[in-house]
Amino acid sequence: MIYSSNADIVPFLKNLVKSLQPYAKSNQVQLDFLTTQKRQEILYQPFLLSQSVVQLICNLINLLPPKSKIQVRLCFIPERQVLLIEVENYGLNLIHIKEVNSNSFYPFNTKEMPAGTLYSIELSNDNQPVETDNPLFQKLHTNDPPQFYREIKKRFTQNFTRTEKLLASLEKYRPQEAAFMQKINTLIKVNIENEDFGTEELCKAMFLSRTQLFRKMKTIVKEAPANYIRNLRLQKAKELLETSDLTISEVAYKSGFQTINHFTKVFKEQYGIPPSVYRQSNHSATNR
């Protein structure tokens, strides 16, 4: 069973962050915990809160490029009698990367910041944010931890794109390479609309030379960086054609292609038909 506890949350969060610092350091990410609170008792569910916070921080560590920073903050707002937990990353806006905050028992509010992304939770003795009718929450009451973790993995991988599913297969045998490609994917995705984001920009973000990046990506995914970026742009375009009513030119722009003619040409090379025909023939399209 999952129980709530009215206890001091300060050492709980401090030690939680401390336990993740070696993992963050191994990924060249700085992870810090800040609070002015020496002690703060509040009603919370330690198991579920730890799962939510750890999942969020680990996802950020996996997605952020080298030299990034994550800051976990804890403060009490006396006028509202609310405890605020904030997790902020610096250096990369992840507001549109849904995988960061998927399937969290404690729901995080997400806010775009000038230098990154802010995730926050409010806790109070009068309001527990966990929805007990959540199917994943119900799984916890079976006292079957393996099933719990299988359920998390199942829900999480459902949000992956096809490219990410392919790369997820690396995790079993080559986890370091999987983490490397996850960072590459994130950088490309957050810059997908920027037509000027190419190999050179990716090298700078990853603190690698062109030769280093080329060799590493050719070894892992058998593709040169430029081709890999183009393929992720095409994948994004394909998803937009399937799920939105954007015009073909808008899809091209949203995917980072400079001209509609170039977009149509490379899309046809990749999928065998022009984007307009693909939209008409796809049953899930919303604009035929």
Image (cartoon, grey):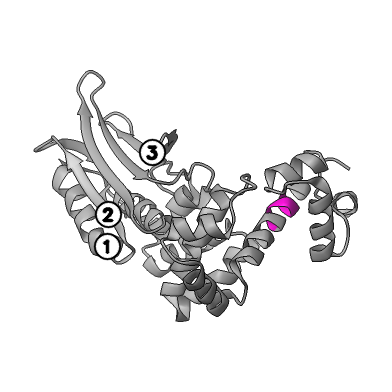
Q: Which residues make up the magenta segment?
A: 235-239
Q: Is residue 147 above or below residue 187?
A: below
Q: Amino acid at mark 1?
A: Lys
Foreground residue among 109 and 4: 109
Q: Is residue 139 left or right of residue 50?
A: right
Q: Which residue is mark 2?
A: 30
Q: Which residue is mark 1?
A: 25
Foreground residue among 145 and 283: 283
Secondary structure of residue under mark 1: helix
Q: Which residue is mark 3?
A: 118
Q: Amino acid at mark 2?
A: Gln
* Residue 155, visible in the rendered structure: no
Pointer 2 or 3: first along the chain: 2
Q: Quadrant of the N terminus?
A: bottom left
Q: Is residue 245 above or below residue 203?
A: above
Q: CA distance from mark 2 to mark 3?
A: 16 Å
Quick one: which residue is furthest to the top in this view? 79
User: Is 118 in the magenta?
Assistant: no
Foreground residue among 4 and 240: 240
Secondary structure of residue under mark 2: strand
Pointer 1 or 2: first along the chain: 1
Pointer 1 or 3: first along the chain: 1
Indicate which label's residue lies in the foreground, 2 or 3: 2
